[in-house]
Amino acid sequence: MNEGEAIKFRYFNILDRQLKKFFLKQNLKIVENFDAKYDEFKKNIIRIIDEDKPEAEKILRNIYTELMRNYGLWQFNELTGSITGFNPTTTEIIKSIRAMAQEQADVITESSKHLISVIAKNAIDQGWTIDQTSNLVKEKITGLAKYRAKRIARFELIGGANHASLKSAEQVSGKVQKYWIYTHDSRVRPTHKQAGIKYNNKNPIDLDKKFKVGNAELMYPADRNGDKKEIFGCRCTIGYTRKKEDSKNVNKNS
């Protein structure tokens, strides 16, 4: 494991813990506001989750910011051999981090409303007692919280690290180009493997160009602005190479 992978692993664990704590605290409030009438309970679910959205956004924003400072700095040093000149707090970077955090907090919020409402409705429709339904909701959403925290943390770390990587590369005075590195195993999606073959280190593209992956156009692997089919569960990364006039490979981020 190189230093870059170690940084990602460290922040994955931090985000996993923070999201797990966030979901469990949210779920406790939902159970405490349980109502045997589904329509009333759904109102409670929506209210609680909406009230918690700023906290989810803050958690994500802080992680993206730390990734930019640490993973971005590591990437910049890999590309230039120096940490001098890297700025993790440009206006453009801060704006992009805020947008990413807000967008993903919205996704998490809407997903939570749907998942927990479905669990509650099924229990209430089956005529369970208040105690039975409350216990079922608590049991189901607690288990779901742990699973979701890990799944979301994994996705956010990949997307956040690739975002930080690209933003650091953009500060290398236009001397590098990017290419797509896919994971060489049986789980890789055909479209991602094809992208890795097409955009390899011998056929890179400029940093401001997009990778065509299936029907999506992505600035980097797990770019949230792309087709959801191509970004969720993505494990790919970006590699960099000197432009042809420099002809020297400066980074393979495998």
Image: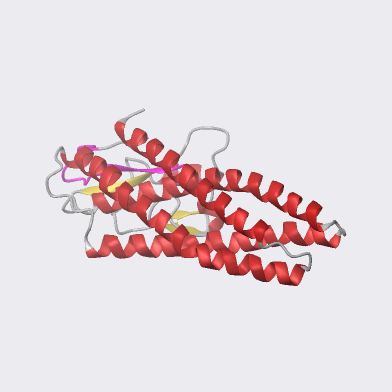
At a point 24% along the width and 37% down the height, the residue shown is 249
Q: Is residue 121 above or below residue 194?
A: below
Q: Position of residue 39 (x, y in %)?
A: 74, 72
Q: Is residue 196 above or below residue 101?
A: above
Tell me which corner region of the image, top left, top right, bottom left or bottom right, holds residue 238.
Answer: top left
Count of numbered marks: 0
Say whether residue 134 is magenta.
no
Question: Which of 236/215 is in front?
Answer: 236
Farthest right residue in view: 127
Say whether residue 240 is magenta.
yes
In this picture, which residue range is highlighted in magenta? 234-250
Q: Position of residue 2 (x, y in %)?
A: 32, 29
At a point 43% along the width and 60% down the height, the residue shown is 57
Q: Is residue 195 visible?
A: yes
Q: Position of residue 80 (x, y in %)?
A: 16, 41
Q: Which colour scheme appears in the figure? A: secondary structure
Image check: 103 left or right of 164?
Answer: right
Farthest left residue in view: 84
Q: Position of residue 180 (x, y in %)?
A: 39, 44
Image check: 30 left or right of 92?
Answer: right
Question: Which of 131/242 is in front?
Answer: 131
Locate the N terminus by quadrant: top left
Q: Is residue 204 visible?
A: no
Q: Is residue 240 above or below residue 119?
A: above
Q: Main secondary structure of the magenta part?
A: loop
Image check: 30 left or right of 207?
Answer: right
Image check: 238 left or right of 130?
Answer: left
Locate the C terminus by quadrant: top left
